Amino acid sequence: MTKAERREEQEKQRAAKAAVQPEGGSSGGKGGGQQQKKTPQPGTQAAESNAPRTPQVAHSSRGAPDASSVPTEKRANEPAGPPPVPTHSRLFPHLRLPKANILASASVAGTSKAEIHTSILRLALQFSSFKITGGNARCIATLTALKSVINSYTTPQGTTLSRHLMTYLSPQISHLVAARPMSASMGNAIRWLKYEVSVLSIDLPEQNAKDFLCERIDTYIRDRITVADRVIEDHAMEKIRDGDVVLTYARSSSVERVIKAAHEAKIQFSVVVVDSGPLFEGKSLIATLPPDLSVTYVLLPSLSPILPTVSLCLFGAHSLLANGALYSRAGTASVAMMARERNIPVLVCCETYKFSEKVWGDGVTHNELAPTTSASAPVPTVSLEHINLLYDLTPASYITAVITEVGLIPPSSVPTVLFRQGVTAAQGL
């Protein structure tokens, strides 16, 4: 017998074995080939063959049919449930939406919900639901909540307040960040607070140390935010004259104070409020302005016909970067660019505690997503994604000057101000 004939005979034997092999033997379970076949008794086999066969349906422990036993056609006809709410963007996976159920995820870095202070839990809910917006408002609310945490803090045995307090504050801060990304103003204020805690004397009694920190927090809010806004208000009012048309975008607490102060000073001017989604903050700004002030409300796409009548642009700031770029509400860059093309002065009201040492080349690397409102929500589909970026980056070339508590400065002077602030902090002033 040749090799070819022998191979042919082996293939026939394999085919014959495969034909007589039972259907259960082809399953992929482990040890399936080692299972022994049970030989049925003759009487039992006859009884089973004569008995009527009923379809078997697998039931769960609660009596409901198992999902795997339901026919595919029936499962396909069932109405599909609501699609899961995405937490990240497919286009920008590094950006995430604020957590709506922040209380359910209160455990941060192994910290239980009971260890998070009630004021922090309340503030995190307000942040995630956008009840508190704006750099100044978020910073003041954060420092006020941290004051409550410090007052209720008790130093454990065997350690000191200056060495253990930041260990206690870190989970509180992490919980706020989990609710919504930290703003530049909050980051600078928290870094300042960490420095104040680190320089506390070890021999200082606990209650005196807590009183000192709370007093320093009040001083920071007063000097860096409240008084700074008043000085910015005085500097900005000097740029508004009778007959001017002042344009602003969205809502800024600093610009709002300037407009109200100029109106109280009997300056005859009008205001143009430009607004856009997703937050439409310009509507809330109009609600707070005096009723006898002439105000025009336009959306961002309708800005071009209004610009020829504008004489001054006043913007707020989320942060001012080291290269002079303005990081503010999304849409600010478009308005500033159009105003600059028509040689309209663009002034930015920004406190120096919002200055940042960072340099970004675009507004996508670091940004934040806002939830989609019901009015602007598109029809949900698999391939359609609605992205609401909260901030954009305005180049320094579009900005005429920055109004701060140290005066009017060009955007290029941000590193100088940061250097002087660092020297002042190092000297303990």
Image (tube, rainbow, N blue to C red):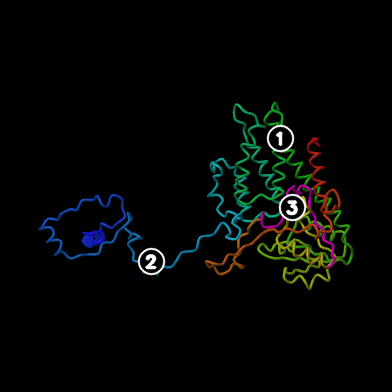
Local secondary structure at mark 3: strand
Q: Earlier in the sequence, mark 3 or mark 2?
A: 2
Q: Give the range drawn in magenta.
A: 342-365
Residue drawn at 58 percent across, 59 percent down: 89
Along the line of sight, the residue nearer the viewer: 13 or 19: 13
- Which numbered disc, 3 or 1, marks the residue that appears first in the sequence? 1
| Disc 3 from disc 2: Cα separation | 53 Å
Q: Which of marks 1 and 2 is nearer the N terminus?
A: 2
Report which quarter residue 218 is drawn in.
top right
Looking at the rendered structure, the kind of residue marked 1 is Asp
Task: Give me the disc on residue 223.
Answer: none
Tags 3 and 2 touching, CB below 8 Å: no
Q: Residue 75 carries which label?
A: 2
Is residue 39 in the magenta section? no
| Residue 351 painted magenta | yes
Classify 10 Å Cα crowding around label 1: few (below 14), some (14-19), many (20 and above): some
The quadrant of the rendering that contains the N terminus is bottom left
| Element under disc 2 | helix
What label sits on residue 211 in the rendered view? 1
Looking at the image, is 50 positioned above or below residue 419? Answer: below
**Alpha carbon distance from label 1 to label 2:** 65 Å
Q: Nearer the viewer, residue 267 or 97?
A: 97
Rounded to the nearest whole Å, what is the CA distance between mark 3 and mark 1? 30 Å
Q: Name the residue under label 3.
A: 319
Using the image, determine if residue 357 lies above or below residue 385.
above
Q: Nearer the viewer, mark 3 or mark 1?
A: 3
* Main secondary structure found in the magenta portion: loop
Task: Pinpoint residue 293: horizontal percent, then vertical percent.
Answer: 81, 65
Identify the amino acid type marked 3: Ser
Query: Mark 2: few, some, or many residues within 10 Å (few <14, many ≥20)?
Result: few
